[in-house]
Amino acid sequence: MQIESGTLGMGGLLDCGALGEGSECRVEAVQETRREARNAGGTCVILFDAVRLPQAEADWFEPAFWGDRASPVASGGRGSAWFVQTPGGDAVLRHYRRGGRVAAMLGDRYLWRGEDASRAFREFRLLAALKAEGLPVPRPLGARLRRSGPWYRADLLVERIEGACSLAETMRDDLPTQPWERIGSVLARFHRAGAFHADLNAHNLLLDRAGTVWLIDFDRGERRRPASGWAMQNLARLSRSLRKLCPPGQEATLELCLARLGQGWRQGWDERGSVREPL
């Protein structure tokens, strides 16, 4: 079934011809399926995309299960992500782990407030919704929760973006040649859709071989009413990340690049009148 006007029903196909740069045409909707499973670690609850994975096992969220088909993700994060080769294709497996001072006390444990409030299930569903709207995010494949008393631990499995490198990597080679206007335009698309990214930085922006800009890692992300206030705060966070990673001696060049990014964002944001607000 072809869905018109940029909307997507369960099991439908997205007509993204009018969505612009970074869209992915004829994306079949994520078919969320829930199951309980058990392995050596105990009982867990799994959400998975039945379109890409006819079944999902508890062991699939353990890096050791994949053996030589798993390799650590080198850049960004907290050393808790792996590239894995799954029956649903190449993927990234991420174990949720706390940062900052609280990490010393709680490590990878989170307070249980129910399945729907868990970080893994919230991110799975947010990615599914953004993907359905034609935004350039990785497709969620599976999420797992393991509860122990008042705490839980969580994992997420998403598709791997083929041939992609982070902006943090590519900007080291040549700052001016990065597609700054395009990056700004893509971020404006997310902001116009009310998609808030809680940790917008250069490691979470990917560029693939075709030049598409992708946004990854939506842990603690959420939908908001589109507004320039929080969107500008989001961009300011990205700017701080880029300045920290700026190669020595290229500070002035980076400021010119940030101006180009801002120009692309403003042009994209000015198109917001043609976008239906999600709330």
Image (spheres, rainbow, N blue to C red):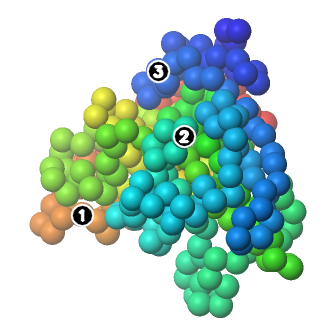
**Residue occupying image coordinates x 63% and y 28%:** 133
Q: Is residue 124 above or below residue 5?
A: below
For marks 1 and 3, give the CA distance. Answer: 30 Å
Say whether residue 202 is left or right of residue 257. Answer: right
Q: Which residue is mark 2?
A: 87
Q: Which residue is mark 3?
A: 20
Query: 7 or 242: nearer the eye?
Result: 7
Query: 131 or 139: nearer the eye?
Result: 139
Amino acid of disc 3: Gly
Q: Quadrant of the N terminus?
A: top right
Q: Quadrant of the C terminus?
A: top right
Query: 275 or 164: nearer the eye?
Result: 164
For marks 3 and 2, give the CA distance. Answer: 31 Å
Nearer-N-terminus badge (1/3): 3
Q: Which residue is mark 1?
A: 246
Task: Give the percent coordinates (x, y) of residue 41.
Answer: 71, 72
Say whether residue 238 is left or right of residue 43. Answer: left
Amino acid of disc 1: Cys
Amino acid of disc 2: Pro
Q: Secondary structure at mark 3?
A: loop
For marks 2 and 1, give the CA distance. Answer: 39 Å
